[in-house]
Amino acid sequence: KVNELADEWCTSEWWIRGFHLVLRVMKANK
């Protein structure tokens, strides 16, 4: 269960980073 939790956390971390990156690009384009 620990490994599954770690994998899920890592996935969420990458998702959040990607989301923030998109927001930066959108703001830069404006």
Image (spheres, rainbow, N blue to C red):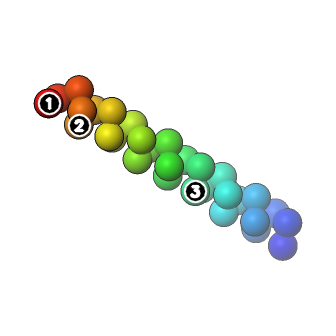
**Furthest-top residue in view?**
28
Residue 28: x and y in percent read 23, 26
Residue at 40 percent across and 47 percent down: it is 19
Residue at 33 percent across and 33 percent down: it is 24
Cα gap from disc 3 to disc 1, whole angstroms:
27 Å
Q: Residues within 10 Å of mark 3 (few under 14, many from 20)?
A: few
Residue at 33 percent across and 41 percent down: it is 22
Residue at 14 percent across and 30 percent down: it is 30
Q: Residues within 10 Å of mark 1 (few under 14, many from 20)?
A: few
Q: Which residue is disc 2 drawn over?
A: 26
Instruction: Tell me which numbered mark, 3 or 1, is placed earlier along the sequence.
Output: 3
27 over 17 or under it: above or below: above
Residue kind at label 2, given as amino acid type? Met
Residue kind at label 3, given as amino acid type? Ser
Cα gap from disc 1 to disc 2, whole angstroms:
7 Å
Q: Which residue is disc 1 drawn over?
A: 30
**Furthest-bottom residue in view?**
1
Residue 4: x and y in percent read 76, 67
User: Pointers 3 and 1 in contact (CB under 8 A)?
Assistant: no
3 over 25 or under it: above or below: below
User: Pointers 1 and 2 in contact (CB under 8 A)?
Assistant: yes
Q: Residues within 10 Å of mark 2 (few under 14, many from 20)?
A: few
State the SS at label 1: loop
State the SS at label 3: helix
Q: Indicate the quadrant containing the N terminus: top left, top right, bottom left or bottom right.
A: bottom right
The answer to which quarter of the image holds residue 11 is: bottom right
Residue 20: x and y in percent read 42, 41
Q: Which residue is disc 3 drawn over?
A: 12
